[in-house]
Amino acid sequence: MTFTWKIGGEAGFGIMTVGLIFSKIASRLGYHILDYFEYPSLIRGGHNAYEVCVSDEEVTALKKEIDILICLNKETFQKHKSRLTSESFVFYDKEEFDFEDNFKKINIPLKKIVADLKGPAIIKNTIALGASLAILGGKIEVLLDLIAEQFKKKGDETVEFNQRFAIAGYKEVKKNYSALITNFLVEKKEKKEKLVLSGNEAFSLGAVVADCRLYSAYPMTPSSSVLHTLASWQEKTGMIVLHAEDEIAVINTVLGASFCGVRAAVGTSGGGFSLMVESLSFAGMAEIPIVVFLAQRPGPATGMPTWTEQGDLLFAIFSGHGEFPKIILAPGDQKEMLELTLKAFNLADIYQTPVVVVSDMYLSEAHKTVEKDWFKKIVAEYKINRGKTNLTQNSKARSKKLEIFLRYKITDDGISEKIIPGTPGYFYQENSYEHLEDGHTTEEAESRKAQVEKRLKKWQTYLKNDFQQPKFYGDEKAKIVFISWGSTKGIVLAAQKRLKERGIKTGFYHFNHLYPLDKEKVFQLLKKDNKKYFLVENNALGQFGKILAMEVGLEVEKKILRYDGRPITVEEIIDKI
Amino acid sequence: MASIKDFNGYQPTWCPGCGDWGIGIAIKKALVELNYSPDQVVVVFGIGCLGNMNDFLNAYGFHSLHGRALPNAIGIKLANHKLPVIVVVGDGDCYGEGGNHFIHSCRGNHDIKVIVSDNRVYGLTTGQSAPTASKGYRSKSTPLGLIENPFNPIALALNSGATFIAQGFAGDINHLVLILKEAIIHKGFSLVNVLQPCVTFNKVNTYQYYLQRAYKLDSSYQRDNFKQALEKSLELNEEKFPLGVIYQKESVCYHESLSQISSITLVEKKRFLDYDSLIEGFV
C-alpha cells in the first residue's frame, strides 16, 4: 500500500510543522515515507503545501495521485484537484467553501472548533491533522506524543491545549465518518526504528560525525537549515557555528581555521557560491582542505529561491580561476548524503583541496525515512583519515634551531606533508601566490611548472585511489539505460519499477562521484552500441551530459530534462520512453 | 630567546625610502621585545606592497587574497586561540576590497591585530587612488581628481566596536614599536593605522607632509574616553594626525564568548562522539 497525504494552506499557517509531524507519525507507526514541501519565497501569504508519500516499502519518489488532501483554504483544493481521484479523501470546512461531490468529502468544522475551544486560527492545522489520522486508522496517541515533545518546554498547559484540538479533529471523524475509516496507517506489528531525515539534516549529521569543528554560512535557501541545525547543536557538539557578514567572509574564515588543522566546512546556494569562488581558487593554490555544501536552486541571479534545479553542476566543476584540482560529489538521496559527506571530509584532508558536495532544494529539504540501525552502522564503520597532516605539534624539540618546513614539497602523489601552525621548531607559509616548496613566492618558470604539476597530480592520485564508478540499478541486459546524477536517483528508480511492471526492462547508471571522471573506466562502461541511453537531469542544458561528452567522449542524445523549478516526475520519464 | 635575525626572511623588495621598511622593522622589533619566536606567531598578509612582507618575515604565515586577510585571521584565531594572530595589510586591501570584513571584525571584537599601511594610494598596482586618498587627489584612475571623500578608518573602527585603535607613523619606528607592542598585548580587536609615505606614487602625503601635521598624544590623553577619541578621529578633516593609542577599552573578545573553546583550543579538543543524543530529534 502506498498513499499520498497532502495539506495545503496560506503561508504562515503552520503547514510545514504539521507536515513534518505527519511524516514522523507514519515513521513511528512502522511505515516508510518521502515528503516534499512547496512554498513561495514569502513568510506570510502565498500558498504552502506539504505532501507525504507513505508506503510499506522504501519510497524513492512522490506519486501522482493524492489520496488524502487537507484543504485549509479553497486555493488548496483548486491547485491540487487535478491530482485527485474519486477515491481521494478531501478534508475541508463547509463554512469556508464547498465544491462538487466527485470525491470522498470530509467536512470538518475547523472554524467552529477553533471558536468553541477558543484557539488561534493557526491551530486549524492540528485539528485537520487529527481528523486525517482518524480516517487513516492511525493511533491518535502517536500524534499526542509528538505534540507533547514539541511543546514540552512551554509547559503542560500548552501541551494539553494543543492536544485538545488534535483530539477534537480526530473525534469529529470517528463520530460522523466512521464508515469511511481505512486501515492505511494502522500500526505495524513489526517495525524497525527509523529516522526522518532531510538531505540537509543528513549533511549536518555527517559533518558532526566527520569531526567538522567549524561551520560557517550566510543564510541562503535552501542551505540555511544546515546552519540552523548545526547552530542548535553547538553547545553539545562543541562545533563553532559562525554566521559571518557575507559568503566571502564565510569561506575565508573556514580557510583560516583549516590552515590551523581544524576540519571546517561552508554551506550555501548558487549565489553565495558565486561569491566564494575566488577563495575556492585560493584553497586550490594554497592547498587548504575545505568541504563546500552547495544546495542548488533555480538561477540565474536570485532565480526561484524556494524551488529546485540541478543548474549549477558545470559551475561547480569549473568554479574558481586558474587550474587546480577539486572533487565534486553529488549524493542521490539522504543515505548517500550521509555517506558522501563523511567521505568528503576525508577526501578534503587527503588531497588538501576543495571538495564540493552538491545537493538541491529537492534533496536538501525533502525528508525520507532511514533505518536507525543503518545510521549506527555507517557511523561505527567511519574512520577519520587526515591524510598527511600531522596534528601533534610536537615534531621537534624546542631547543633546536628553527627550520623552514617544506609545506609544498614535490612528491610522487602530489600531496605534501603538513604540520600545523604553532608546531615548535618550524615555520612556513601557505601562499596564494605561486610558491616554492618552502612556501616563498616565486615567478620562476621551472618552479611554477613543478607546482602546477604537483597540484594537478592530486587528481590522478584521486582517480587511482578514491574515484567510484556510477552505481548500476536494474537489468544489465536491458536495452534502455538511464544516466543521471544527484537527486534524480529515486525518481528514476521508481520509473524503472513501474516500467518493469509493464514488462519493460531498464538499466540505470547513477553517478555520485561527478568530477573528475575516470575517462577510460567510464568509457568502457557506457560505450556499448546496442543500448539506448536516456539522460535524466533537472536542468535545461543537460549539464552532466556535457561533462560526459567532454571528458569521456560520449554524447547522450536522448534527454529527459526539467527546468521549471519542480522535481522531475516518474510519469514524465515513462512518457518519454 | 629569538632575535630580529630569526624573524628575517628574504631581503625586502620595497622601494628605497618606502615607509614599509619602517613598518617591517617595527613589527619584528615588537615581536622580539614581546619575547616571541617565529614558530609562536601567525601572521596573515594581504595583497599589496606591505603584504609582500610574507617573504621577508619568518613566522607561520598565511598569504591571503586581496581583501580577505581579516576573515582568514578570525578563522585562525577560532581554530587555535592560543596563537597571537597579526594581520599585515594595506589601505586598499583593508578599507577598500575588504571594507565589509573590517567593519564586522571590529563589531565582533575578534582578537586579531590589524596593522594597516595607510599610504593613500595603491602602490603595487602603480599608484591609483586608495579609499584614504584626499578629495581631489589625482591619480591614474582619477586623472580629473577624486570625487569621493576620504575613508576615515579611526572613526569607522570606533563606531564599529573596535577596542584598541591606534595611529603610528612609518617615519618614527621607535614610537611605532611601542604602539605595536600594546596592540599585540591588547585582548580584542586592535587596529594600528600606520601613516606610510609612498615615495614612488604619492607626491602629496610625503614624510614632510606628515612631519608637519602629525603629533604625539601626550600623557594626559585619556584613551578610554570614547567621545574624545571620536573628536581625535575627526581631526583627519583638518589634516591633523594624532599619533599613539587613540582608544582602548577592556571588553570580552569573540572567542572568549564561546563555551566550545573555554577550556581548550578548537584544534586540540577531543572529538564529539555522542551522536545518539543528536538523532533523538529525528525519530
Image (cartoon, grey):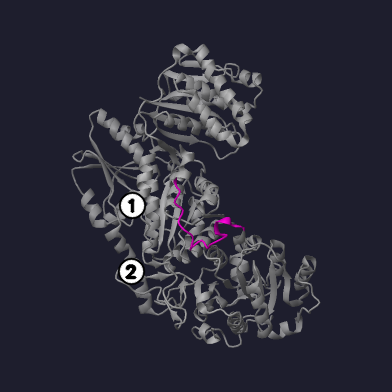
For residue B20, which quarter of the picture?
Answer: bottom right
What residue is disc 2 on?
A414
Q: Position of residue A477 (x, y in %)?
A: 18, 39
For the record, the magenta segment spans: B257-275
Disc 1, SS:
strand
Tags 1 and 2 both on a single chain: yes
> Which quadrant holds residue A396?
bottom left
* Subunit under mark 1: A
Would you name the residue on which mark 1 appears?
A513
Q: Does residue A382 lie above or below A40 as drawn?
A: below
User: What residue sits 52% from the left and 12% below the top?
Assistant: A175
Tell me, yes or no, whether the highlighted magenta stretch contains residue A263. no
Pick the residue in front: B275 or B91.
B275
Location of residue A548 in the rendering, given as x and y in whole percent from the top left corner: 30, 52
Q: Amino acid at mark 1?
A: His
Residue at horizontal 49 percent and vertical 35 percent from the top:
A37
Q: Compared to A27, does A348 lie above or below? A: below
